[in-house]
């Protein structure tokens, strides 16, 4: 039991009310003789002869009790008495605004439930978090419940995976002073492992959001895309990728392949259907994987859309930015060792262009200005300290970059001992940072008297090195919302907002196209089998209590009103003084 | 003003009843008071509130009090910092202080700060960050930023000030920071970092694959200032590697190469021993690693007894040698063994003992699955083993050199010259020239004898070495024509002489003008032919018929020639030279030297290899790499090349046989052979590359398919999973599988990953407790929170810790709303009216009638 005034102040107030009424109650009619000319004036004489002085004797204790009760009720209402058991516990309300709440009026219903629930919780003990792509507080402790309504106006559920677990994890990062109730309003629930690992003083429950039967049945047969990604073509073609799309269906019905469009144009190629899997559980959703091989790509946007539609639109479409597999344009300064050009000629990913033809990478002698400020493979004189020197851009870890490139460039395969013996110099590799990427190598190493050009590592060195300089990556592409993308310093949203990761990985939290440093782009899409299959909604360990909450104040006021009426009637009838 | 329960307002319409029920009110004042009581009560029930602008800005201070924070002498204490921060803000602002504390700080200290600051400043809310574990000090700036973002409701104005050294134990603040910047909430910073010279270990990492028996590398990052320190790498009580003389000023990476312990999961401890170290407890760090099983070697030998055990002893525990030498005839068994092999050793086994099906299977395994092939050869295999034009030869990095020996068989030639009178003049000259021609065709190791007949027979030159050309020429020159022609005795003389000669060929050449007596030549000559003595005849001079001589040659198994004049001298075929293949194996002591980069040899000292005792001559293929060669003639001894996805290495001697007998004495031979086999097997990629990462309590396992088939990966916990279900890997892109699941951060996860198409290829995965989270006082300085970048990106400012007053700006709220409740005041009003009502009922009337009339 708590009040907004505090326990002592409330008690003092009650005592004061009792005291005041005690004093008023002892104001009694003093007997005196009033002469009336006629009984017609009897009533007036009684009215005029009310108590006017304190008398010594305390009479009508039940009347006093009535007065004090009415006064006490009004005082307790003023003091905002909270008698619910939750008053001693913190309550975290997590309002689910993820994809499953987009169907019909589920989110609006959830908001109504939250607004209904919150007033019954202790003002200082309640915390409401809206779990959309960035879980945010919509009602902080101490704030008025009305603000919840104000802050929820105009908000909608988003086509994102559930973020309830994330919000819960963040909130539980604090040291709790009191036990805590966590109430999830919506479909999402944290994973069972998270539930099992909750501290013993944290009680988690869920409030069902009512939905129409039509909506529920549609959800039961929901079909959505749950995987969509590309990988380098198994055929080995440099400029082609293989595509995978997985379609999941909850309930019975035919699973149809998605229709593909490339930059908005129908692709005209059909998926190959392979295998069907069923997730565990009696009502396990079924998934079918569709493959498309050898799709030529040069940075286009590929969209997969399921024909028809259902109540959950968020998973009916998925998009993907294909890699740009156009050849890397390399400008090569004249009079450089011909072995370099030979390697470029046989590499399907590289082509030699003139310096004026907008090359992406340049190969030149160090110190020259050939082809301008571009990522460059430079042949240095023997005066430089390191035989191989890698320059990465700000934000990259030079040591880690060198370590990674050491293997990829095949430097470990070079007979450095032999080269060192012949050159009579220490063969070493170094790394640093600069305005743009660069690789510098001693030009002497290209002479045939050393084993560098003839080694198996040389083609690797040229091909991988030029790819790295041009920022070409061989990564597979799939970007479900919430997936972690490493090695990103900066990301840009479609609206042009810049996101800095500060050394952390980048996590797209909402659907959309993101530009990443190094010229990469990812198109984040829902792709969540739990959302599509409706598995998450069924994982509820405990439903929140039948009574969403109990606010005693209106009842106090109503009781006071009732007693006032009774007291008024009794007084009018002269039953009480 | 709005009403939260406006329905109660309908009750106002019933207020008039006060005046008439249960009876009419005559005291108007009383009636009014009572009406006001009910009206206030109804308003209170209707819950009126006023919604307006002007919400209080919310400011959050993140106060890092973790163990790593070493304040400078000039920096204020925590309480002072909070006070200054509070004073810098508007008095009406809502303030929250989020404290990051070390796990070992007492609650008393905590309360002291709040009490100290609470006396002077009003802090609306204190939030303490729960330490990750009582066993692990941590300072999670990311959790603090998340809680700070949560402390500022959506649409409210606010700011976040971070007072920290930036050495957070994790770097997972990306999302929280993005949330703040997206809401334009500035992040201010008070940098409390003071450069620490305490030598400490701030990082320990290993290569992706650590395999038993193979050298692994541990990269240890040191920070601080030290000289002459010692770095020790341990697995339990076992010391794996020690490095002396470590110096560090700032941050230094040190690579320690070590031999991993047995296959399985191990806690590897890196320990820094430095003199005069003020905080020695920061000199130790532990990381759990997975040591993979040894490489599987499928041994196919034949000649050596106990070769498998010998090879296993040589290679050590990094390899598991399976001897399939006796199982090559069983196709199913060998296929099964091949499926689980990383490298196949074909040790001096002749091609005839490797069935064609097995050779094809090896070729496919190398080319398509990247299995390594180590083919070694001595006398049996590469010498005359018969791999020429086989699948194996096509893959080898060398070509066989087939040297042939030209055989010139020894011959004894008995020249019978007719020196009768009919040969006078030109014929004799011509006969001598033909004889000289015949003698010239013979080699010094041949033998020649000259018999003349002129009515009788005599040896002009007895059978002697053809090298005695001078004597033979003189004997020939001495011949002169005269006398009768009796050939038979001369042939008989030659016959008997040749019978006693040991040469490969024995030949009789008869030079005559055909004017010879008749006789039983046929039986003699046929007998001679039967005994390997052939007889050829030459008709010397013109004008005669050689029918008789043709018969003689025919009977004697030789040839008939006609030398009509000196311009038509015949080419005599006295013997038939032949060739034979020389053995390619050279059983001789040979000095060899190594080439190849450090990638091949690592730390192994191959500058002075022992001499070989025998090898097979070969030539290097153009696209092959030479690893060991003979010092003379640059003959390949060890060469390698890629073949499809795999690698094939050829060793031109028997690794366990007599050819490498001297190497067997070499202490580095096992390591040498192990490096070669390991490098050869490197192409034997597992079907998937597995990676396990952890972000707080979320674990992610990713599998990337490396082979071009439809293999599907699986992972399973190896130990008691304590309720965790084996995660199911989902294919997100062709060949890319992922599973994500929650797991407490202090829990060790040990898994085994396999692929359905290669169930024997298991990969151990481990995620140690607190992986991804540094120890509180061992945070890599290069991973410090970038204050300036964060402030610039969010519109905040880097504040001077010594400043008395901080310039703290707040975001501009989009829709600052505030709500004031009116209804409690309505309830209070109702109470007051009610008291007034009671008082009125008992109050003295203004009138004081004593008489009513």
Image (cartoon, rainbow, N blue to C red):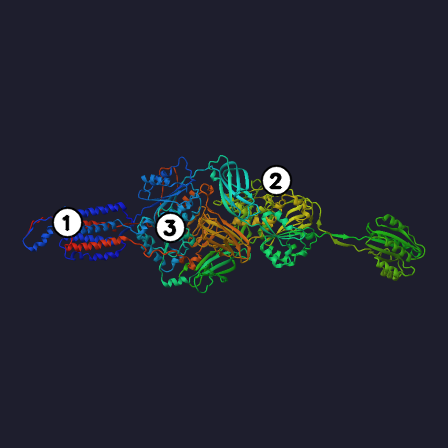
Q: Are marks 2 and 1 on the same chain?
A: no
For the image shown, how many numbered marks are present on the structure? 3
Give the crowd class for mark 3: few <14, some 14-19, many >=20 residues within 10 Å.
Answer: some
Residue visible at 79% across and 53% down in the picture: B408
* Drawn side of residue B825 relative to residue A162, left or right: left
Residue on which disc 1 sits: B842
Numbered circle sitting on residue A202: 3
Is residue B248 something one can see in this rendering?
yes
SS at badge 1: helix
SS at badge 2: loop
Does label 3 or label 2 sit earlier along the sequence? 3
Between the C-alphas of marks 3 and 2, the distance is 70 Å
Which of the 4 quarters of the picture holds residue B576? bottom right
Between the C-alphas of marks 2 and 1, the distance is 117 Å
* Drawn side of residue A158 relative to residue B629, left or right: left
Q: Are marks 3 and 2 in contact (CB under 8 Å)?
A: no
Is residue B430 something one can see in this rendering?
no
């Amino acid at each position: 039991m708590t009040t907004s005034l505090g326990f002592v102040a409330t008690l003092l107030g009650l005592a004061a009310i009792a005291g005041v009424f005690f004093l008023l109650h002892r104001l009694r009619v003093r007997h005196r003789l009033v002469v009336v000319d006629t009984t017609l004036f009897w009533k007036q004489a009684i009215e005029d002869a009310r108590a006017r002085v304190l008398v010594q004797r305390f009479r009508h204790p039940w009347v006093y009790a009535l007065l004090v009760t009415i006064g006490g009720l009004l005082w307790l209402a003023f003091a905002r008495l909270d008698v619910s058991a939750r008053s001693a516990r913190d309550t975290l309300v997590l309002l689910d605004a993820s994809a499953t709440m987009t169907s019909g009026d589920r989110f609006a219903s959830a908001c109504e439930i939250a607004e209904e629930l919150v007033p019954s919780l202790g003002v200082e003990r309640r915390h409401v978090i809206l779990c959309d792509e960035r879980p945010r507080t919509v009602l902080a402790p101490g704030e008025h419940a009305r603000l919840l309504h104000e802050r929820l106006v105009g908000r909608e559920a988003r086509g994102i995976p559930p973020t309830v677990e994330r919000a819960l994890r963040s909130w539980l990062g604090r040291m709790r002073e009191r036990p805590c109730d966590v109430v999830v309003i919506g479909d999402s629930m944290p994973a069972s492992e998270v539930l099992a690992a909750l501290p013993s003083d944290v009680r988690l429950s869920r409030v069902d959001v009512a939905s129409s039967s039509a909506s529920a049945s549609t959800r039961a047969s929901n079909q959505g895309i749950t995987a969509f990604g590309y990988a380098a073509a198994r055929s080995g073609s440099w400029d082609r990728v293989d595509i995978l799309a997985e379609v999941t269906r909850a309930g019975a019905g035919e699973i149809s392949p998605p229709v593909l469009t490339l930059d908005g144009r129908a692709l005209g190629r059909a998926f190959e259907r392979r295998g069907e899997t069923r997730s565990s559980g009696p009502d396990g959703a079924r998934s079918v994987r569709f493959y498309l091989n050898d799709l030529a790509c040069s940075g286009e946007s590929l969209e997969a859309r399921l024909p028809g539609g259902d109540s959950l639109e968020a998973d009916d479409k998925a998009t993907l930015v294909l890699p740009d597999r156009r050849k890397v344009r390399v400008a090569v300064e004249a009079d450089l060792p011909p072995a370099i050009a030979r390697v470029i000629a046989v590499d399907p990913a590289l082509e030699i262009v003139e310096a004026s033809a907008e090359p992406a990478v340049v190969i030149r002698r160090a110190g020259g200005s050939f082809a301008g400020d571009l990522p460059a493979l430079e042949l240095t004189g023997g005066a430089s300290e390191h035989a191989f020197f890698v320059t990465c851009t700000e934000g990259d870890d030079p040591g880690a970059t060198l370590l990674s490139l050491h293997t990829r460039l095949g430097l470990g395969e070079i007979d450095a001992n032999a080269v060192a013996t012949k050159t009579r110099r220490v063969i070493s590799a170094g790394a640093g940072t600069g305005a743009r990427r660069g690789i510098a190598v001693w030009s002497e190493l290209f002479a045939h008297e050393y084993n560098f050009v003839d080694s198996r590592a040389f083609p690797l060195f040229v091909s991988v090195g030029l790819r790295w300089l041009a920022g070409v990556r061989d990564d597979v592409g799939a970007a479900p919302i919430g997936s972690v993308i490493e090695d990103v310093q900066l990301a840009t949203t479609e609206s042009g907002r810049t996101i800095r990761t500060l050394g952390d990985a980048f996590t797209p939290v909402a659907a959309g196209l993101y530009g990443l440093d190094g010229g990469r782009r990812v198109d984040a899409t829902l792709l969540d089998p739990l959302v599509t299959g409706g598995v998450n909604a069924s994982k509820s360990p405990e439903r929140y209590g039948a009574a969403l909450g109990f606010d005693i104040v209106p009842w106090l006021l109503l009781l006071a009103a009732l007693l006032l009426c009774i007291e008024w009637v009794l007084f009018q009838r002269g039953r009480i003084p | 003003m709005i009403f939260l329960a406006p329905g109660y307002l309908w009750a106002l319409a019933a207020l008039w009843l006060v005046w008439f029920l249960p009876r009419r009110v005559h005291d108007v004042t009383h009636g009014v008071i009572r009406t006001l009581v009910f009206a206030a009560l109804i308003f209170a029930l209707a819950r009126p509130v006023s919604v307006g602008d002007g919400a209080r800005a919310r400011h959050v201070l993140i106060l890092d009090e973790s163990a790593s924070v070493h304040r400078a002498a000039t920096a204020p204490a925590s309480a002072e910092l909070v006070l200054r921060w509070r004073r810098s803000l508007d008095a009406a602002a809502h303030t929250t202080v989020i404290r990051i504390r070390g796990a070992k700080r007492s609650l008393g200290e905590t309360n002291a700060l709040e009490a100290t600051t609470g006396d002077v400043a009003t802090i609306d809310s204190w939030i303490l960050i729960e330490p990750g574990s009582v066993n692990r000090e941590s300072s999670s700036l990311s959790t603090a930023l998340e809680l700070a973002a949560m402390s500022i409701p959506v649409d409210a104005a606010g700011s976040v000030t971070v007072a920290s050294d930036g050495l957070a134990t994790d770097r997972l603040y990306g999302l929280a920071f993005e949330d703040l910047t997206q809401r334009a909430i500035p992040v201010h910073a008070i940098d409390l970092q003071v450069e620490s010279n305490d030598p400490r270990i701030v990082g320990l990492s290993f290569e992706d694959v650590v395999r038993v028996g193979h050298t692994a590398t541990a990269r240890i990052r040191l920070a601080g200032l030290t000289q002459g320190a010692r770095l020790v790498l341990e697995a339990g009580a076992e010391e794996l590697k020690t490095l002396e003389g470590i110096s560090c000023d700032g941050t230094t990476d040190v690579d320690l190469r070590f031999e991993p312990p047995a296959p399985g999961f191990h806690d590897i401890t890196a320990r820094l021993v430095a003199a005069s170290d003020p905080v020695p407890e920061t000199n130790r760090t532990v990381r759990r690693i997975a040591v993979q099983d040894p490489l599987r070697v499928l041994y196919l030998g034949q000649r050596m007894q106990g070769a498998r055990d010998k090879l296993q002893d040589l290679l050590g525990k990094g390899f598991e040698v399976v001897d399939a030498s006796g199982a090559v005839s069983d196709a199913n068994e060998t296929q099964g063994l091949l499926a689980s092999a990383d490298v196949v050793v074909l040790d001096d086994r002749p091609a005839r003992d490797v069935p064609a099906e097995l050779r094809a299977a090896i070729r496919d395994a190398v080319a398509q699955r990247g299995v390594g092939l180590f083919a070694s050869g001595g006398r049996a295999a590469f010498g005359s083993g018969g791999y020429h034009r086989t699948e194996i030869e096509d893959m080898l990095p060398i070509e066989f050199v087939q040297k042939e020996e030209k055989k010139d068989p020894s011959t004894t030639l008995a020249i019978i010259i007719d020196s009768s009178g009919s040969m006078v003049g030109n014929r004799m000259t011509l006969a001598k020239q033909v004889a000289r021609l015949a003698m010239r065709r013979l080699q010094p190791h041949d033998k020649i004898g000259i018999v003349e007949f002129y009515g009788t027979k005599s040896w002009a030159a007895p059978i002697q070495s053809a090298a005695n050309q001078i004597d033979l020429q003189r004997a020939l020159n001495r011949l002169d024509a005269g006398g009768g022609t009796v050939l038979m005795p001369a042939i008989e003389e030659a016959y008997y002489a040749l019978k006693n000669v040991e040469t490969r060929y024995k030949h009789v050449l008869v030079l005559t003008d055909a004017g010879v007596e008749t006789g039983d030549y046929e039986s003699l000559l046929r007998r001679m032919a039967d005994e390997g003595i052939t007889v050829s005849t030459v008709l010397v001079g013109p004008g005669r018929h050689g029918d008789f001589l043709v018969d003689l040659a025919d009977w004697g198994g030789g040839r008939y020639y006609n030398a009509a004049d000196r311009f038509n001298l015949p080419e005599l075929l006295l013997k038939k030279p032949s060739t034979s293949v020389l053995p390619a194996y050279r059983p001789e002591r040979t000095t060899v030297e190594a080439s190849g980069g450090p990638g091949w040899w690592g730390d192994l000292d191959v500058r002075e290899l022992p001499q070989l005792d025998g090898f097979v001559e070969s030539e290097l293929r153009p696209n092959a790499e030479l690893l060991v060669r003979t010092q003379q003639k640059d003959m390949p001894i060890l060469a390698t090349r890629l073949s499809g996805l795999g690698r094939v290495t050829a060793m031109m001697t028997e690794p366990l046989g007599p050819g490498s007998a001297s190497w067997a004495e070499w202490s580095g031979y096992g390591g040498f052979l192990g490096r070669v086999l390991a490098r050869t097997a490197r192409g034997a990629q597992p079907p998937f590359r597995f990676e396990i990462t952890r972000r707080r309590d979320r674990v992610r396992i990713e599998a990337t398919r490396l082979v071009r088939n439809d293999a599907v990966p699986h992972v399973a916990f190896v130990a008691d999973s304590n309720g965790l279900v084996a995660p199911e890997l989902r294919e997100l892109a062709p060949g890319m599988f992922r599973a994500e699941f929650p797991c407490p951060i202090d829990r060790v996860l040990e898994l085994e990953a396999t692929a359905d198409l290669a169930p024997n290829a298991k990969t151990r995965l481990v995620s140690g407790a607190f992986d991804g989270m540094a120890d509180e006082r061992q945070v890599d300085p290069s991973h410090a929170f970038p204050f300036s970048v964060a402030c610039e990106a969010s519109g905040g400012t880097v504040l001077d810790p010594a400043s008395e007053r901080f310039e703290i700006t707040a975001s501009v709220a989009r829709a600052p709303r505030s709500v004031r409740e009116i209804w409690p005041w309505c309830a209070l009003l109702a109470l007051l009216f009610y008291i007034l009502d009671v008082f009125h009922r008992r109050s003295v009337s203004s009138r004081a009638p004593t008489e009513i009339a």
